[in-house]
Image (cartoon, rainbow, N blue to C red):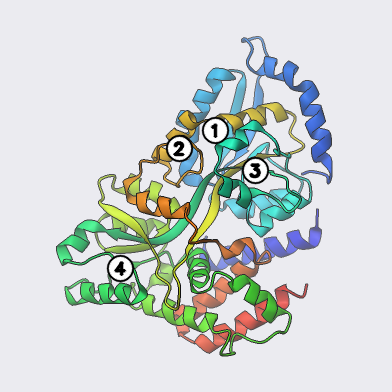
Amino acid sequence: MKKRWISIMLSAILAASALTGCGGSKGGDSENAQTAESAQDTQQADASGGSDSEKIVLEFFNQKVEAESLYNEVIIPKFQEEYPNVEIEVVSPSDAETVFFTRVSTNDMPDIMSIYPAEYSYRVIMQDGLLADLSGKDFLSRASESAISYSTYDDGKIYAMPYGLSSYGIYCNLDLFEAAGLELPKTWDELIACLDAFVEKGTEKPLIFDGKGSLNQFAERLIGIVDKDFADVCESVGKGEGSFADADKNQVRVFSEALLKLAEYAPDDILGIGRDQGTADFCNGVYPMYVGGTFYMADILAGNADLNCTLIPIPNPDGAESLPINVDIALGYSVNTEHPEICEAFIEFMSRPEIYQIMADNEGTPTCIEGVDYKITALQDISQQITGDNTFLTLVNFWPSGWRTEWTIYVQNLLSDKDIDALITETDRICKDYYNQ
C-alpha cells in the first residue's frame, strides 16, 4: 500500500467533509485465484447445501446508498434462493468514500465492494493488488464494450464488473415548462433565455442544485463540458507550461462565468442547500430545473413517482457539446476474502439480465448490461446519448487523488465572493502542487 497516497487521499476527503458536511498484500490476486479454483467445488457445495452446512457471512460495502433497501429486500433474498447458507451483510455508510479509503489504509477490506473503476483513486487500489482479477470471466460479456473499456486497468485486466453508466445534466419539470409555454433548451443561450423567461413569468428562482454536498460533482462536470481535455491542461500547467490566466487557457474563467451565471437563478443560500432539500423541492414543483446526475433518479422517484420530468445535457457555454459519463455501478471483491467463489457468484448473479432488470427499474442509473429493458421514462433520452460517441469520461478519473476535493473549496469561495481571478490563482497552485508530488 502506498502510504503517501493514502495519506493524501484521506486528508483531502476529510477536509472536504469538514467543509461541506458531507487489507491486502501486493501480488496476491493470482495466488488467490488459484486457491479459489481449487476450493470452489467444496465451498460452493457448502454454501448451497442443506441446513447442516456452516453459515457463510460476507460483507458487501455498498457505495450506492440509495440502493441499500433494494439489495436487502429484493436482490439478496433472490441470491439466497441459490445460496441458502450465505448471508450478505450490506454496509452503506453515508460518508462512504471516506470510510472506504480509511478501511483500505488499515487493511480492513470488505469481501465485496462497489467501486468506481475508471477513477484514479480506485485504480491505485488495483495497482496495489487488493482486488481480485476478473479478466476472462464469461459474465463480462454481458456488459457493453464501452463499459468494459472504461473499467479496464492499465495492465489490461479487469478488477470490477460494470453494471451502470451515469451522466449529469439538468432535470426539467415538463409540466412547468408546458405551463410556461417553453421548449427544452439545447444551447447555452437557450438555457439562459429559458431561465429568464421563468423569472419574467413569476418564478424568481427557477434553478436549484446541491451546493452543500455535491458541488464537487457539479463543478467537475461543468468544467469538463467546457473542455473535456481539461485534465491534460491541468497537467501542463502543473508542469509549468503556462497559467490559466493565459488567453489560450481560459477554461477556468469560462467555467467561473458560467457557474456564477447559473447561480443568479438559484437560491441565495445555495451553499447551504443539500441534495435532500433540492430533491424534495424539485419533486414538489418549487423549481422547474434541478442540476444533478442520473443517480438522483431513485430519490426523485421516491419523492414523487408521478413527476413528469426529463434529464437534459448541460449545454457548453463555450464550444461543442459533449456529455460527461462515468462508470457508476461496478462490483469487485477482495483478494483476501475467505470465500472468493461466493463473491464471484454474487457478481455473476448481479449481471444476469433478469436480475439487473430489478436494479434498473428501481435504482435508475442507466445500465450497460445487455438484455436489460431500461424503462425509466425521465432518463430515456440521456441513456441513449450515454452510448453515443459524443461523450467524455469525467475528469475525476484523470485528476490526481485529492485534486477535485481541494479545488471544490475554492469553487465554494467563488460562489461566495465571485472572485474569478482568485479561483484562477488557486487552480494554478493546485495543479503545481499535485503534479509535482
- Please state which of residues 376 and 285 is positioned toward the viewer in this rendering: 376
Q: Amino acid at mark 3?
A: Ala
Image x and y of residue 306, in percent: 25, 46
- Asked if residue 204 lies left or right of residue 291, the reply is left
Q: Which residue is mark 3?
A: 160
Q: Residue at x 65, y 43 (%)?
A: 160
Pointer 4 or 1: first along the chain: 4
Q: Which residue is mark 4?
A: 185
For disc 2, the neighbor class at 10 Å (few under 14, some 14 to 19, many from 20) is many
Q: Amino acid at mark 2?
A: Met
Pointer 2 or 4: first along the chain: 4
Answer whether residue 213 is visible to the viewer in this image.
Answer: no
Q: Amino acid at mark 1?
A: Met
Mark-to-mark CA distance, 4 and 1: 37 Å
Mark-to-mark CA distance, 2 and 4: 30 Å
Q: Which secondary structure, mark 1?
A: helix
Q: Which residue is mark 1?
A: 350
Q: Which residue is mark 2?
A: 359
Q: Amino acid at mark 4?
A: Pro
Q: Residue at x 37, y 73 (%)?
A: 269
Mark-to-mark CA distance, 4 and 3: 37 Å
Q: Which secondary structure, mark 2?
A: helix
Pointer 2 or 3: first along the chain: 3
Pointer 1 or 3: first along the chain: 3
Label 1 close to label 2 by CB (< 8 Å): yes
Pointer 4 or 3: first along the chain: 3
